[in-house]
Every structure is written in structure tokens, then in C-alpha cells.
């Protein structure tokens, strides 16, 4: 079983912000594979959908914690479903990638992403997969908070739609074939 986590912030005011790119991707994955609706899981404080993508069992989750506390939900879900970190995919925004780009990585540093840092702390490892969705570009400021809580511009929204479709394809490939194949095909 794979555990696929879409990081972001809960609540309508954050729904379309750049920080919620991971939530958007996992929600689209659920829609594509008819895994809706998400239901609230009290023990993990996350919206959860379970089912199969082709023959592989999956649990998709959208933590209802704020980004910087994502590790609480991820660790609770991993324990409950008995999923080893190597079968976890964390999907999140990445300010170092431009809008329209994505990259799959394994066992890398957090690169300063507070949600990923919190997951590493709570899982006690960095040995899980990450699908990073670009939200960066020409920044006028070095302050990440000035970027991540902004909505996508109309031009960025067009790029976002393309990369979310690609992210869903990459996650589907990782689940049904292998994460390594997805990395080879989608990191090119």
C-alpha cells in the first residue's frame, strides 16, 4: 500500500494559494481514479480517501493541520496503515522550482521546507518520496512567506493546470509501475 500525502493549509482562505499545490495535485489524483469523497479521519486530523489505483492499494490524505505541523498527520497515518516511509509520497510546493515544473526525489534534505522538515522529524527519517511542484519564479523578495501564501496569477494558473496533470500521471506511474520509473520518465 502507498500513502500519498498532499501538503497545504486547510480552509477556504488558503485553497488557491501556492502553498496548496500539493493538496491540489492529490485531490486531482483522487478525482481521476474515482477515490472520492475524502472523509475526515479524527485520529490523524486529515481528510482521507482509500481505494485502488489499478491493482495497487492506496491511501490519499490531505492533512487538516497547517503546513508546518504536517508531520503529525503523516506519522499518525503511517502508523495506523502500517506503511513504511519508503512507500510514502509527499506532494508539496517548491519555491526553488519555477511554476510549471515538478520533480520527484527520494531521501533528500528538506531544502528549508517547513512542512517536509516536520514530516522528517515525526517519521524520524528522510527516506520517503517527494513530488515537488514548482511555485517559484522571479521573486522580488527573499521571504518565502511573501510567495507561498499568494494566489497563482492567471498566467501561472495555466502552467499550474499543466503541471498538476503531469503530477497525476507521475504519481499513477509510480504507484502502478515503480517510483524509479516515474523518476526516469517525469524528471527528464
Image (cartoon, helix red, strand yellow):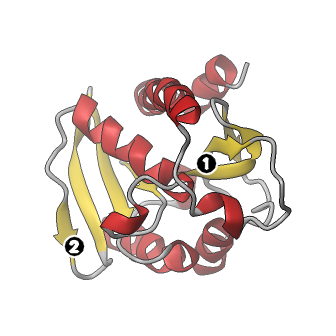
121 shown above or below 6: below
Reply above or below: 145 against 17. Answer: below
In the rendering, at what x and y percent does residue 32 appear? 26, 29
Residue 72 x, y percent position in the rendering: 47, 80
Q: Which residue is mark 2?
A: 41
Kind of element beneath mark 2:
strand
Disc 1 and disc 2 in contact, CB within 8 angstroms: no
- Measured from the top left, where is residue 75 in percent x and y? 47, 74
Side of 62 where 47 appears, left or right: left
Image position of 61 with respect to 73: above or below: above
Residue 89 seen in the current view:
no
Of tags 1 and 2, the one toward the viewer is: 2
Choose between 74 and 101: the one closer to the eye.
101
Who's the residue at 57% across and 29% down the image? 155
**Image mark for residue 84:** none
Tell me what residue is drawn at x 81 percent, y 42 percent.
138
Give me the C-alpha separation between circle 1 and circle 2: 23 Å
Question: Which residue is found at the position 23% from the left and 36% from the top?
Answer: 31
- Residue that mark 1 sits on: 129
Callout 1: helix, strand or loop? strand
Position of 37 with respect to 5 (left or right) is left
Quadrant of res 83: bottom left
**How many residues crowd mark 1 within 10 Å: few (<14), some (14–19), many (20+)?**
many
Of 75 and 17, nearer the camera is 17
Question: In which quadrant of the rendered image does the C terminus lie?
Answer: top right
Q: Earlier in the sequence, mark 1 or mark 2?
A: 2
The crowding category of the residue bearing disc 2, from other C-alpha atoms within 10 Å (few below 14, some 14 to 19, many at least 20), is some
Q: Is residue 169 left or right of residue 186?
A: left
Q: Position of residue 178 (x, y in %)?
A: 53, 29
Going 45% across and 69% down the picture, which residue do you hit? 74
The answer to whether residue 84 is seen in the rendering is yes
Amino acid at each position: 500500500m502507498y500513502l500519498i500525502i498532499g501538503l497545504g493549509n486547510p480552509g477556504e482562505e488558503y485553497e488557491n494559494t501556492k502553498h496548496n499545490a500539493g493538496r491540489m495535485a492529490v485531490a486531482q489524483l483522487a478525482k481521476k481514479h474515482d477515490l472520492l469523497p475524502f472523509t475526515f479521519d479524527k485520529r490523524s486530523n486529515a481528510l482521507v480517501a482509500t481505494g485502488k489505483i489499478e491493482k495497487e492499494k492506496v491511501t490519499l490524505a490531505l492533512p487538516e493541520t497547517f503546513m508546518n505541523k504536517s508531520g503529525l498527520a503523516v506519522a499518525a497515518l503511517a502508523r495506523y496503515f502500517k506503511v513504511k516511509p519508503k512507500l510514502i509520497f509527499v506532494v508539496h510546493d517548491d519555491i526553488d522550482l519555477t511554476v510549471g515544473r515538478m520533480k520527484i526525489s527520494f531521501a533528500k534534505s528538506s531544502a528549508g521546507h517547513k512542512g517536509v522538515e516536520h514530516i522528517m522529524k515525526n517519521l524520524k527519517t528522510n527516506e520517503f518520496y517527494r513530488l515537488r511542484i514548482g511555485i517559484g519564479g522571479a521573486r522580488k523578495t527573499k521571504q518565502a512567506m511573501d510567495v507561498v501564501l499568494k494566489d497563482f496569477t492567471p498566467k501561472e494558473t495555466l502552467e499550474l493546470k499543466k503541471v498538476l496533470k503531469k503530477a497525476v500521471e507521475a504519481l499513477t506511474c509510480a504507484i502502478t509501475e515503480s517510483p524509479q520509473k516515474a523518476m526516469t520518465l517525469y524528471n527528464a
